Image (spheres, helix red, strand yellow):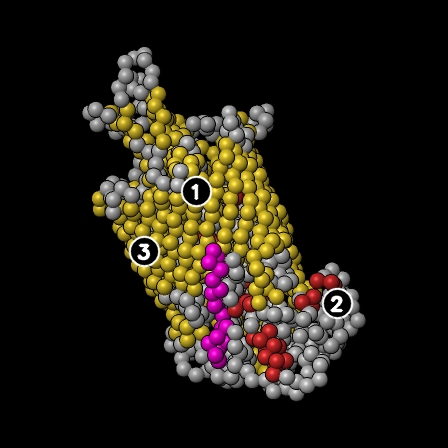
Amino acid sequence: MSLKNATMKTKENVSDSNRLQGGFILNTHNRALQLCTVAILLLVLLPVPLSAGTTGKIAGIVEDDKTGDPIPGATIRIIGTDLATQTDMDGEYFIINLPAGTYSVAVSTIGFQTIEKQNVRVLMDLTTPVDFTLEQVEVPLKRQVWVYAERPPIQKDLTASRTIMTADRLNYTPNNLSVQSVISNMAGTIVDHNNSLHVRGGRAGTVTYLYDGFSVQDPFAGNSGIRIMPDALEEINLTSGGFPAEYGEALSGIINVVTREGTIDYHGKIKFYDGYSHKYDVNTAEYGDLERTDNNAVSYNFSGPLPRFLSRRSTFFLAGEYHRNEGYLPHNELEQFTQAGKFNFQPTPNLKLTAIGSYYRGETQVYDHRDVNDLSYDFNLDGLGITKSKAYLYGMKGNYNLSDRSIMGFAYNHFYTETKRAPEHLFDTYWSDWPGYSENADGVYNGTIQDNNYQLAQEYYHTGFTYDDDFLPVYHKRYTGYDAASMKFTSQVNKFHQLRIGAEYRDYEIFWDEKQFFNASPYGEKYKQSPLYAMAFVQDKLEFRDFIINAGLRWDYLNSEVEYWPDVMDTDEPMVKSEPQSQISPRLGVSHPISDHSVIRFNYGYFFQVPNYIYMYTNLDGNLNSGLPLVGNPALKAEKTIAYELGLNHMVNEDIRLDVTVYFKDIKNLIATTEIGVVGGSPVTQFVNEDYGSVKGIDITVEKIARGFLSGSLVYSYMQAMGNSSSAYDGYYNYIANTTDTVKPVQEYPLDFDQRHTATVTMDYRVPRGWRGKFMGVTIPGDWGVNTIAHYGSGLPYTLTDINGVRYGSINEGRMPSTFSIDMRFNKNIHIRNSGNYFTFFIEVENLLDHRNVVNVYTNTGRADDDGRIYTDTSDPDGDGPLTAEDVNRYYHLLSNDPQNYSSPRQVRLGFEFNF
């Protein structure tokens, strides 16, 4: 991509009529008709919760161990619940609507032994096979056998690409501080140096986050609007291709997390760790030795039964964490507090109610070596702003068993997320009242200020001080809140056929307030809007011996509910009301078991995502007189992906599983920025549906299943992510604001996140309790484990330029160096005698080899530490008289060596847990 000048680094995403068209996009001009359509669909689908799926199903067959004959009438029970069923005449059974988690399943019948299978893992949206073979016994003799169940190595009803991580694996994974750090080790994912997640070549912000089935998406930023605690999770999974009709609002993937359920006995955990790292010195551009830093956290979880008088079989789960990290860079602090809870009530055997809540509060300050004006703040780090965030979610879900085959449910939730950014020492007062600025009732800036920031500073001795205030005068506040009601009906019509129908309605309130006082013509914007969103789906799952089919249809609706000028260049014309947009998405997934050890699958579907709200509502008041104006567009269509994939899941032997998936994605209607006119000699730019791209790739996973001490996996991905633009802002920054490369490309080129090769190797060595070994005559006790993750990524692309920022060669023709890192976790359990309580001591190391990976470069040199400038200034930075070569070299070295061009140094965490 082209840049304004050679000292700028590779650019990332900034700040964050009645006819059926190809792609199934419907435009309806009559608002009354749209509202009637929504109402009719909700009424038709009223039979019920539509928070996205958080439950699974178990099914199997019960047979005589000698004859192999089916045993009809046997009773199957889920221990600790009221759920039970009986086998049919073919000895088969199923139990639906089980929350994701681990269960014990028992079977009993007259004349046969009773068997209880423990550790049966139920996964969301999937069927777990649990078969029994019973031994005949003499009546009335009763005999019970306990069996430890193993998770099926091949999930035969999985018709899409999904990577699943359960609580037991999460507990041993290094660097599991966030959901994104866990997801980044899964096939088809990369995280760029902006900490943006890309799945299978998709842009940042094209992944949806679901928390216990509720959306926690920030529609401004395109990521999770609330922190999700990995320690509170029962399961986390990434569906990177072919997600069923129940899921939407995403072009690239669905991240679905389920928090733990309460237990029938009281259990808990307290965890603490302290951190060490190599700190960076801005005065020397060097990293120090490993030392203790203010990086620590304390967390807990606690679960158990509620008092029985509240309701039968009522439980609770609570979890919380306080985390502080001053970072290895100066003024790069993080402080956050998270609390989560889940309460289950069962007033009657057929009715289950679940209350869910989560709260987050955080404060961060991000080190900025060189800002957008090419200023270095190293000698005035107090001038950097801070960001404060808060978010909360609460909701209620209910499920009523109409029969052992049908479930009716409902759900309601409220979600709120807020972000505020301003100078630290004037965070709460500066923007409401200060000399030269006042805000009247309509929110329009009506003051004047002087230019108080260096605009053209290019020399090494400028340190980021402003003329008057010694800080960066920028204010930003945004929030999003919504209320949602949803319904879903699930029916196991027969043992082969499961039907799901659902609908959801959301009422949003969004707010944006930003003021950028850099010059005598400051830019400010403030708005509050109330868009409406609705969806409905039907999903049919057919499970036969030789094939499984997931077929579905999804409808999405968005009304931006705003008046705007159709032609922003002609504000004399009357404003118009925004038109609602809707889309229909067909989905099809097929799985075919070709043997007991192999399954092939195919998936095809249309996937839509409504535009980021900032693309629709920016600058709709027609303010075209400040800087290079950028205007929103409420008429934007949903972005669209048509995706295909073909996969093979094969057991090489009883320990080794192979999964191969090839995929292709055709991406259209991506948001772009294009010039629509000129005002005062400056181009006016608007968001439009103009960009496109294509992605093809292959994911290969070889897994060593946990038998004995060793387990692990090798995940390799090859991908080509091509397109005409890497983000919605590329047109604005690269071809409009930049006078050296003004023609937007037509042909596709490698996108900024086109990482051709990625590989992740995971190894887990776990020694059980009671094991004893010797090494050099020394006895080594058991109950310990080591988990190691090694990650490799080939170099990301960048555009070669000369020292003036003029592109030469093709866009993104250059490649940065490849990256490599190793993370490790060691833990040792120490049990308290005659109790179930135990301590766990652990050490975690990120970047074990302390390898400094290059993650960004200067485009004219291709280096991370050399911007290519030759300085000839005659001033004297250190004030000792003459300007020496040492002066020039020292300050040039400080300016060019941006620590943000490199990955984080080694970080170590030492801690303990107490489990009770």
Q: Position of residue 418 (x, y in %)?
A: 63, 56
Q: Mark 2 — residue?
A: 439
Q: Which amino acid is tagged 2? A: Glu
Q: Mark 1 — residue?
A: 785
Q: Are marks 3 and 1 in contact (CB under 8 Å)?
A: no
Q: CA distance from mark 3 to mark 1?
A: 26 Å
Residue 336 visible to an observer of this rendering: yes
Residue 108 quadrant: top left
Q: Which amino acid is tagged 3? A: Ile
Q: Mark 3 — residue?
A: 700
Which residue is at the far left? 67
Q: Which amino acid is tagged 1? A: Gly
Q: Earlier in the sequence, mark 2 or mark 3?
A: 2
Q: Residues within 10 Å of mark 3 (few under 14, many from 20)?
A: many
**Is residue 65 on the magenta stretch?**
no
Residue 573 quadrant: bottom right
